[in-house]
Amino acid sequence: MSVQQTIRFNRIFPRIVMVLGLLGAFSAQADTASEVPALMKLLGMDAKQLAELEQGKTVPFDIAENNDKELAAGVVMYMPAKPDTLVKFINEKSLASVDTDITAQGMIPANAGLESFKGFSLKAGSSEAKKLLRAEPGSQFNLSTDEFNTLADIKATDADAASQAYRAILLERLQAYRQKGLKGLAHYDRGDGLFARPSEELRAATMANKVLTRYFPAVYKMWLNYPAAMPAGATEQFFWLNRKVEGRPTAILGHRILLSSEAGEVMLSRQFYVGHSYNSNQLSIACLPYRDGSLVFYANRSFTDQVAGLGSGVKHSIGREQMRGEIVKRLVNLRGLLK
């Protein structure tokens, strides 16, 4: 399976966390914009790139990758809106407003049951429904050993049965995450005794953010040790998506944290279940007041088996560029919607 088929959705962190740390450090200052040059320098950017941002261009910044399954990239863009306006718009208008590959989505309430996923379905007559009900351990679907066994016991072959089975899997995975956090994430059975471990991937991504640990210790501890109490100024949301990835519908479960401060707005998002193609994801959006609008720092970190192994360096290079392209596309879409 080619790398060009893999990178279609949100991923996160390292240097963006430096932005978060600076936001925390600057929160007592009246003029956050005066710190922008120092922040840009921290991200490896210069005055020329800051000028490009003011002209409406997008500027990439590098994020270190810690293992051969990681892909990470970051992009900065100037937006003609204040930070709170941006985050409110994204939150109210939904991800589908900037991500046209999302075909259905829904917010998940605290007392979620199967009805919370009724908007998720696989089309009647679709090959995806048939493949799901015949699924076996491997790379075609991200499922645990028990989930594969459950599907094997279903005798029906229609899309309704497949959709109902998938909704049950989503509910069980949601409940496990809410009860145990990252420890509750079941491994993906790849067959032949091999497993992908999204829990370890997301934990490693979170622990790598030393600046977040320093400046936002309460948020860091909550994010790493969820379930835990929300720190002051933070709220959480859970959501599901049906998104086209590699031309296939895929179910995604997400956990989002919104943090407001005097310095700006921060959104953290974790995809703790993804139906296929990549294993897990974290993204961060930090909106910093600048001139009459905001500088938006958008960073993704994703984990996928498809860029590991032979030719990993080339696969990472291609995947990273694809990821940056997706980020730019979303930011441009967002800017267009704000006009």
Image (cartoon, rainbow, N blue to C red):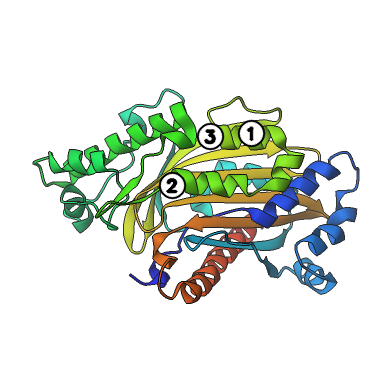
The answer to whether marks 3 and 1 mark residues whose Cβ atoms lie closer than 8 Å is: no
Q: Earlier in the sequence, mark 2 or mark 3?
A: 2
Specify which label sits upstream in the sequence, 3 or 1: 1
What amino acid type is highlighted by mark number 2? Pro
* CA–CA distance in space, label 3 to label 1: 17 Å
Q: Is residue 109 visible?
A: no
Which mark's residue is nearer the viewer, 3 or 1? 1
Q: Which residue is mark 2?
A: 198
Q: Image height check: is 339 above or below 170? A: below
Element under disc 2: helix
Q: Kindly identify the amino acid type of the residue bearing the numbered disc 1.
A: Lys
The residue that appears at 86% across and 59% down in the rendered structure is: 38
Question: Which residue corresponds to mark 3?
Answer: 237
Question: Among all residues in the image, which is located at the extreme left?
Answer: 155
Return the residue at label 1.
Answer: 221
Circle 3 SS class? strand
Q: Residues within 10 Å of mark 3 (few under 14, many from 20)?
A: some
Give the position of the N terminus as an image quadrant: bottom left
Marks 2 and 3 in Cβ contact (< 8 Å): no
